[in-house]
Image (cartoon, rainbow, N blue to C red):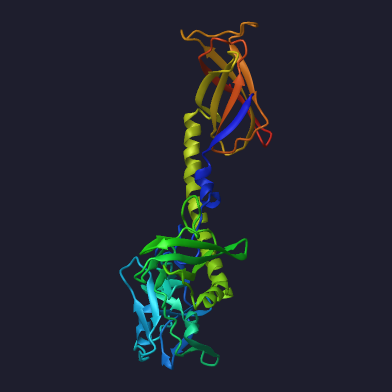
Amino acid sequence: MKKWIKPIVLAAIACSMLLAPVVCTVMARSNFISEGYVLGETVAEQMKATINGKSIPGYTFRNAFWVPVKHLTQYGFDVAINGNSTPIRITRNVSKEVKGVTDLQSNKQTQVKFTQRDVYVGNRKLTSYQIDNTTVIRLSDLAMFGGITWEAKSKTIQLKLGNFDYQNKMNVWLTDDKVYNRTGHKLNEVGLKHYYFEKGVLKNEVETLSYVSESAEILGNKDTDNKRLIIGYVGTVLNYIETQDYEKIVNPYVQQDIEYYKSDTRADDILFQLQNEDKVLKKEYSKKLKVFKSNLKNELIKNNYRPLKVIGTLVKYDSIGTPEVSIEVWNLTEKRIIAFETTITGYDGYDRVVRNSISGESTFKGIAQDFVLDSGESGVLTWDMYFHDNTIKINPKITSVRFSDGTVWRAK
């Protein structure tokens, strides 16, 4: 055997979802979890919550209290919901009266579902879920607007709003994919910092976008190969902008946003999302592996239970005219193959058998060893077929196969 090449791994349909550069989104968006996927259930004994003393209904999940975004319009906030695809933007309106809503607190267990819809306060992306067909966020993520206290006896979270409004006066808006310039003037630069976890360590990547008119694509938080969000992505911070007059304006909230992305709560959100993505991947893996094994078994039956199937041949010549014969084989078993033997018959342009010009033998015997061919894998092996100089095509037959468990199959 001259060469061993493993160009095709048919088993990839079973393992690629876990091992390929599948760069998953960890927060709101996901490449694996679909809209409406059930993440868990709220607890039956719900916490309670108030904003400025006004009761706000919500749900207890993951040891936190989650409130419907739509209700916040009655609690001193403006909520911009434009269609079903754009992010939801929450803005504090200090002149707005906190009236509250009349909806009653639910104490029933309810499914918590995944949503692809992102929710932002300014340019800070919050964790969001879907409960009872409405988008919810964690009440404590609004703590920047005042003070959060916990009343243990009544199990009540209390948010007291202050006058801090977190207004995006820079008028530059972020999503995971784009920067939107709403200043009315072209910007020389937009400076970004992307935060992500790598092997449990929070890291950041700096990206500078140049000459931004109305919008610009964000690439620094994406995998370079498939343009999807990198594994462990936490969020992006607007660091600064530079105007056409070369004035550098630093985001006044940059440090607060960084601290939010560095928080233990955010890290727990990422871990929770990864755990659910892992469940989905394992389920898909199991389904595809079952189909893969069924298809492999059918191929084994069609191959008369011969463990290796020849799926391709090729004849080339080296610099001195010696035929280089290659065969591509496919492992149809669920076991690992570590060696096999073959007899190869060569033919000339008249379909005549080419005999060895020295020994007169009509076949060439080849052995393939020092290689591994796992279940479902295919590979190409090449031999120099010395003294069969007129060979232009071949007919190989597998005569024996040795498996890693020590067993041997032999052709009858």
Q: Position of residue 98 (x, y in %)?
A: 37, 91
Of 208 and 41, nearer the camera is: 208
Q: Is residue 13 above or below residue 350?
A: below
Q: Is residue 185 above or below residue 63?
A: above
* Residue 143 relative to residue 77: left or right: right
- Farthest residue toward the left? 83
Of 168 and 64, nearer the camera is: 168
Quadrant where the image shows the C terminus: top right
Of 352 and 238, nearer the camera is: 238
Residue 46 visible, this orientation: no
Q: Position of residue 63 (x, y in %)?
A: 53, 78
Residue 195 visible, this orientation: yes
Write down the quadrant of residue 99 in the picture.
bottom left
* Residue 343 relative to residue 167: left or right: right
Q: Position of residue 366 (x, y in %)?
A: 63, 20
Q: Position of residue 125 (x, y in %)?
A: 46, 71
Write down the quadrant of residue 51 in the picture.
bottom left
- Farthest residue toward the front? 245
Quadrant where the image shows the N terminus: top right
Q: Is residue 36 above or below residue 15?
A: below
